[in-house]
Image: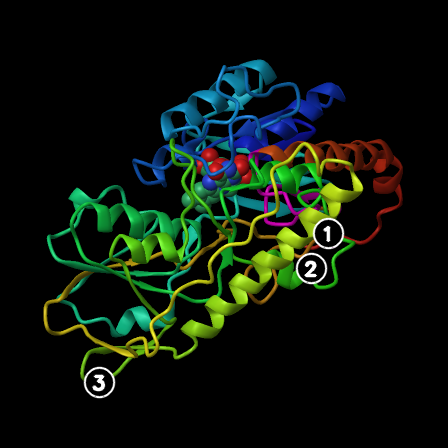
Amino acid sequence: MRTAVVVIGAGQSGLAMSWWLAQRSIDHVVLERGEIANTWRTERWDSLRLLTPNWLSRLPGYGYEGDDPDGFRTLPQTVAFLRRYAEVVAAPLRTHTTVTAVRRSAADYEVVTDRGVWRCDAVVIATGAFNRPSVPAVASAIPHSIATLSATQYRNPEQLEPGGVLVVGASASGAQIADEIQRSGRSVTLAVGEHVRVPRTYRGRDILWWMDAAGILDERYDQVDDIIRARNIASFQLAGYPDGRTIDLNSLTAIGVKLVGRLAGVNGEGKAQFSGSLRNVCALADLKMTRLLNSIDEWAAQSGLDRQAAQPQRYAATAVEESPPLLLDLTRGRIKTIVWATGFTPDYSWLHVPVLDAKGNVRHDGGVVSEAPGLYLLGTPFLRRRKSSLIDGVGDDARELSAHLASYLHRRPLQSRFSLQPLDV
Ligand SMILES: Cc1cc2nc3c(=O)[nH]c(=O)nc-3n(C[C@H](O)[C@H](O)[C@H](O)COP(=O)(O)OP(=O)(O)OC[C@H]3O[C@@H](n4cnc5c(N)ncnc54)[C@H](O)[C@@H]3O)c2cc1C
């Protein structure tokens, strides 16, 4: 089978790219191992609501059409939204088709699937950035009596044995999961490392409204000082609850969640050891939140929005006990389950083109994989903009990358005529 471009993955990234390729009349196919929005269907917990408001889902050629723009989609609503988008795009989809290998030859790319082989001039990797749970090495030292699961395996509190739960990681997933489990009647201890604290609403508007309006979400990858750090920053400690409440460490301690520092190890006696940095990481998160709010206030003043918006607010510092516990005995039966909410890594095990760095990430320049002309990446954190991995962010990146891709295809016949050396395989 032959086409100009193979797009791998039918989440928002693959579909947005399909839209732009169609606009540019470029022949392509979108290969998906499951169904449309497979990740949302199979790898998220039941109660998850998007942390982005409904209006913040402007995809190329499509956007929110309902009457609750400030609400937060449930999981089934998110799946329905992306299914509808696939219809609007009229994406040339092949679902239940798993890509098992991508290779590059002198002439083109070979995309091997469990349903045949495609040859094409270009490949767009839109397989998602959050494929595998990133579980720390300390996991191997956890006593066998304790059940462990990752945020992608967690579905709801009923799935857990009765008893205490240690949630490791306090970004969006960890904070939301800790909140839900504590409210189910189990006692939760939350291990907190570096995190990003933001209020849900600020000066009468959603925090993401401010970040969008002030251009913070549009900040470009080639304008930040340290793009490697920017690409690895944890997700906002944010949730899309129907009542619009803020989730942060103060709201969690208020319902009884116990805070401890980052999980550093498990000693020979089966005691979990926590870093003594809890107060510092919380103070840092508070400081960074205040800096963000200061920059929003400055922008509001400059843009004449000061009088329309509510007064600037500042929030109580994160309350941390004087000497948080540094040890927790895992052998005493107090903790029955550990949930790893420690982030994710992408899975490129099928990519047989030598473009991966030591951490297994694709080396790229804003999604253009220069070491393998014709290969593109889409949907990863801060790919081209701060918003790149959000539903709302992928459209701009897809537009720019599809323009680069179109020009690559246009130049190709000339290029291959002069290509005397076999390319890497
Ligand atoms: C817990 C969580 C909550 C999030 N909440 C929000 C939110 O509220 N708002 C927001 O804007 N963003 C949110 N995001 C970020 C982002 O929008 C999602 O991760 C989204 O799923 C990314 O879309 P994508 O298309 O880039 O990747 P995915 O949705 O992961 O799509 C990739 C697709 O590729 C397919 N695939 C993978 N490998 C292969 C293969 N070898 N062959 C064929 N197909 C393959 C997968 O089945 C999948 O369907 C959240 C992320 C997480 C992890």
Local crowd at mark 1 within 10 Å, few (<14), some, or many (≥20)? many
Tag on residue 268? 3
- In this view, the residue farthest toward the bottom is 268
137 falls in the magenta region: no
Please tell me whether residue 388 belongs to the stretch shown in magenta: yes
Q: With respect to residue 373, does 121 lie above or below?
A: above
Q: Which residue is mark 1?
A: 221
Residue 421 vertical position relative to residue 299 in the rendered view, above or below: below
| Coordinates of residue 304 in the picture (x, y in percent) | 77, 36
Position in image of residue 256 (x %, y %):
24, 57
In this picture, residue 200 sits left or right of residue 241: right
Q: Considering the numbered disc 3 on the image, is that residue within a helix, a strand or a loop? A: loop
Q: Position of residue 274 (x, y in %)?
A: 33, 76
Q: Is mark 3 within 8 Å of ligand 1?
A: no
**Which of 342 and 6 lies nearest the eye of the viewer?**
342
Can residue 113 be seen in the rendering of this structure? no
Give the structural element (helix, strand or loop) at label 2.
Answer: helix
Q: Could you tell me the amino acid type at mark 2?
A: Ile
Circle 1/circle 2 CB separation < 8 Å = yes
Q: Amino acid at mark 1?
A: Tyr
Q: Are marks 3 and 1 in contact (CB under 8 Å)?
A: no
Tag 2: Cα neighbours inside 10 Å, few (<14), some, or many (≥20)? some
Q: Main secondary structure of the magenta part?
A: loop
Secondary structure, mark 1, is loop
Q: Which residue is mark 2?
A: 227
Q: Is mark 2 within 8 Å of ligand 1?
A: no
Counting residues from the start of the chain, the first of labels 1 and 2 encountered is 1
What residue is shown at x 43% (from left), y 76% (from top)?
A: 277
- Does the CB distance between marks 2 and 3 fall below 8 Å? no
